[in-house]
Image (cartoon, rainbow, N blue to C red):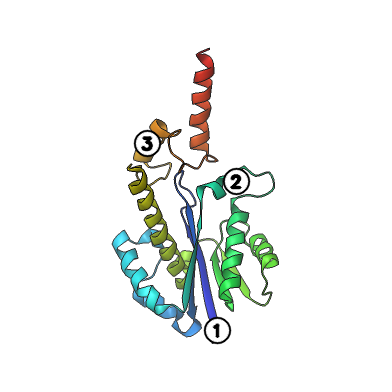
Amino acid sequence: MVKILGIDEAGRGPVIGPMVLAAAMIEDGRHASLKDMGVNDSKKLTPEMRDRLFGLLKGHLLDYRFKILSVRQIDAAVDSPTTNLNRLEMAYMGALIDELRPDVVYIDAPTVSTDKFSAELMDRLDNKKVRLVCENRADAKYPIVGAASIIAKVKRDKEIEKLKKRFKVDFGSGYPSDPYTKIFLKENFDKYPFFRRSWAPWKNLNQKHNQKRLGDY
């Protein structure tokens, strides 16, 4: 039996909340059936469709795993002089691959230079015989990556809802392009721990705030 693994993330771009990296594994002979189920890039599906498919996938896949990358981890990677967000993702991808031991892995690569990303990821793996296929927009090309994208998105949405309930706030989607998020960030950037302080929108507001305080003296 050839085991195929797909890996994708959800929440790379938001200024609020964690990112979730997910891996979905299936037998080679059942890969095509994912498309028949309606599996696709999670961004092309409604929340209701994602929830329904997630329920179906849990009984259809050989296995699945996910990793939650916290705001603190993301900020540390982005602001680090020795690493970055791509390498943080890579470390977690490597952990998922080593845990699940697939034969082939399809990855929605976060970089334009997919060959370089693939080579660096391979260096991190215990199993050097695994075949890596790292491509941009792999979630739209390979159903198993689409499955991983659905799992990642469903899990991240749940994490976002937890934040809203815990802090009793509504900040919209958390993406910088969301007008609701923009307003919330501007009014509350220094009040909550769930902002990514390594992101330019947060840094710009913080800098303006500090400049204004200095101007008061």
**SS of the residue under disc 3:** helix
In the image, is 115 to the left or to the right of 137?
right
Of mark 1 and mark 2, the one earlier in the sequence is 1
Location of residue 137 with respect to 71 vertically, above or below: below
In the image, is 119 to the left or to the right of 205?
right
Residue 72 location in percent, x, y? Answer: 54, 47
Which callout, 2 or 3, points to the residue nearer the camera?
2
The residue under the point 39% across, 51% down is: 160
Which residue in the structure is indicated by mark 3?
Answer: 184
Of mark 3 and mark 1, the one earlier in the sequence is 1
**SS of the residue under disc 1:** loop
Q: Give the residue type that dot 3 points to.
A: Phe
Which residue in the structure is indicated by mark 2?
Answer: 76
Q: Residues within 10 Å of mark 1 (few under 14, many from 20)?
A: few
Which residue in the structure is indicated by mark 1?
Answer: 2
Give whichever of 29, 196 is nearer the camera: 196
Q: Residues within 10 Å of mark 2 (few under 14, many from 20)?
A: some
Extreme residue in the left direction: 48
Q: Give the residue type that dot 1 points to.
A: Val
Extreme residue in the top direction: 217
